[in-house]
Amino acid sequence: MTKTVLVTFASQTEATAEVAEFIGKTLEEQGMIVTVKAVDQVTDLNRYQALVIGSGVKMDKTYREAQEFLKRSRQSLLQKQFAAFITCGSLSKDTAENRDKAQKYANQLAEAASARPLSQGLFAGRMDMSRAKGLIGLLMRKSASKAEDWRDWDSIRGWAVDLAQQLN
């Protein structure tokens, strides 16, 4: 039987959304039926056998929308396979300290879900304040910050392929 998977995400600059789309395509290539949606567009989890959720990080916290979605979905998650990923600038430099920091961010999603994920993906993100929303985005666009993309698509693909094997 083909697995039905929801890949959902909270993203403020579209970096995490792009990773979610890429993970969704990779899972489809592995034979799964995948839907990719922002957490604020998800109304029903009943039609999915598995859930993958991703969040960016701002000010040392995963996005509130992702945490609230997981808290609302705790009961449904008891009957589903569950995986989570984060994208963050901290992993732009691969050090033990930065990996520990990223793991703490991923653990915030697990805590919000009150569930242990089957797998956790820890990925470097993209810093592009031209895409940021709100006051912080406005302030950063006026600064001299330049856009940088640290995402390792091969690593993301490898995680998604491994995840597909675990889901099967």
Image (cartoon, rainbow, N blue to C red):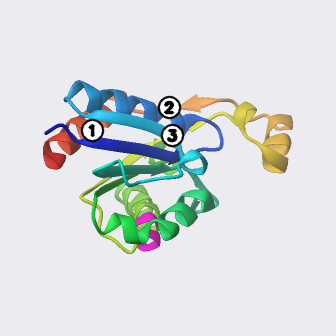
Which element carries disc 1, helix, strand or loop? helix
Q: What's the CA distance linking mark 1 and mark 2?
A: 14 Å
Dot 2 or dot 3, earlier in sequence: 2
Q: Position of residue 129 (x, y in %)?
A: 72, 36
Mark identifier at residue 146:
none
What residue is shown with label 1? Answer: 160
Residue 40 highlighted magenta (yes or no): no
Residue 111 highlighted magenta (yes or no): yes
- Which three-letter amino acid code belongs to the residue tagged 1? Ala
- Which residue is at a point 51% across and 40% down the rendered structure image? 37
Mark identifier at residue 18:
2
Asked whether residue 37 is in view, the answer is: yes
Segment colored magenta: 109-113
Q: Nearer the viewer, residue 4 or 163?
A: 4
- Which residue is at a point 33% across and 48% down the rendered structure image? 48
Dot 1 or dot 2, earlier in sequence: 2
